[in-house]
Image (cartoon, rainbow, N blue to C red):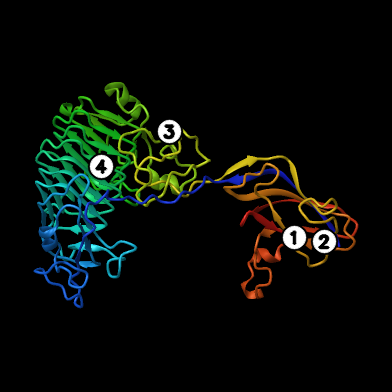
Amino acid sequence: MSRIRTTLAVGVTLLGTVGLPAVATSGAQAAATTLYVNNSANAACADDGAGTQAQPYCTVAAAAAAARPGQTVQIADGIYVEPVTVDHSGTAGAPITFRGPTPGQPAPYNSGWAYLGTSDKPSGGLTVKGAQYVRFELLKVTTGPQAAAVVVDGSRDVSFSEVGLAGGPALRITNGSERVSAVRSGLSDITVDGGSTGTLLSTNTAGSVRVDGAPGTVVVSNTLGDCSKGLVLTGASAGTTVENNVINTVNERGDRCDAGTPAVGITVDRSATAGLKLDYNVVDSRSGSPAYDWAGTGYTDRAAFTAASGQGAHDFVEPTSKDARNRPDAPKHQFDSADENAPGMLTVDLKGNTAQDDPTVPNTGTGRGIRDRGAYEDRTGGSAYTPVGPVRLLDTREAIGVPQARAVAPGGTINLPVTGVAGVPADGVTAVTMTVTATEPTRDGDLAVRPFGYAWSSPSSMIDERATTSTLNWVAGRTVPNQVTVPVKDGKVSF
């Protein structure tokens, strides 16, 4: 038998609290009517029907022709190889919504994807022409390389959320369109031109963004590049904001692009410099090409660019996220460093994750200081070692951490709460470092410290090798201490 006392002598390991993903909504709807589209063999679909769940439309185009303010076009999982034109408008309080499979809907409207074309079966694309207050959610549109997947032509108040668009370019906003937004989407390339105003591009992945004569465009928190010209601003695009973007100038393996492939991170023509705010971006330094092309002059480092342009004071030119995540010695300036006050910032990242503090890097961003740059919030950040105490959490001689003072019997187990006790935080603790001491043992023995709920009685073939390794070994009459770091489960550890 032995007595055990435990002191939390060094510290605890902390991680930031993980929030729940926010769920975007499409705004209030004046009418609850839903039009259904399902072209599967057993759907009994008909384009000349009413688009009910019992007899849905066969094509998205038929539903688009019928949709009116306040209606949602709910599209089933499947491939729809067809051109679609949306020229009917909703209202501010009752938009027309086109939505792919959504949790909570009846099957087959609740899972999978609605594809307007695929790489081997490209569609005729999606055109929004002269329409207002239209929403697109959870769709994928693919055309051939010579056709745009989606064209927004002379329309306003059109939004795209959680869509995947691939074509040449994936998304083109043109002909004086107003207040068009694309958020949390995967896009091959984006073009904004034709005097379009008030465009918002936030928290997307894209090969490149080209803004030509489109004032008031906001390009915020996107991850761009992969051997494309990441961001190009030309023409009279006064009042454009470019912040918190991560621009990769190398391929997905981290290698330089083929000779002749454009790899400049940010290009700003002289005509597009008026009223521009460009800051808090990260441009990959590995391409061998200039990070910036400002009014025809290339700059390979941030300081020289800022001196010449007055822009980018908080930018970094360094290896981007893929290096930083996989190499502990790589720069991590893109983490916890975004301008949270930039226009168009969302509450979640591309995958729906809220901001998470990486305690291994300083919080240098604005606001809470913990938002990452780019479309992704890093979830692989390290842990912070935070000293607490020393404090005593367990002493079997004095009924500290146990109901009564008595020695631990051979084969006994103590489950000890360690969070929310004696100054240890109640939340975010992943491990504790403790000094464990066996004192006044009456015979030889050993002790193991494990996460709470460890499977002590598993068959020997399934036992983790660590289960056969003790934390303390002692002989009768000899007091023996040892330090151990052990993961915390449900706020407890087990002895």
**Local secondary structure at mark 3:** loop
Q: Is residue 10 above or below residue 54?
A: above
Residue 92 appears in view: yes
Query: In this image, 182 relative to 87: left or right?
Result: right
For the residues marked 3 and 1, what is the alpha-carbon distance in whole angstroms? 44 Å
**Local secondary structure at mark 2:** loop
**Label 2: how many Cα within 10 Å (few below 14, some 14–19, many 20+):** some
Closer to the chain start, of discs 2 and 3, is: 3
Residue closest to the eye, 149 or 177: 177
Q: Is residue 315 above or below residue 475?
A: above
For the residues marked 2 and 3, what is the alpha-carbon distance in whole angstroms? 51 Å
Q: Which residue is mark 3?
A: 365
Give the residue type that dot 3 points to.
Gly
Residue closest to the eye, 58 or 34: 34
Q: Quadrant of residue 473?
A: bottom right
Q: Which residue is mark 1?
A: 414
Q: Which residue is mark 2?
A: 408
User: Quadrant location of the N terminus?
Assistant: bottom right
**Label 3: how many Cα within 10 Å (few below 14, some 14–19, many 20+):** many
**Local secondary structure at mark 1:** loop
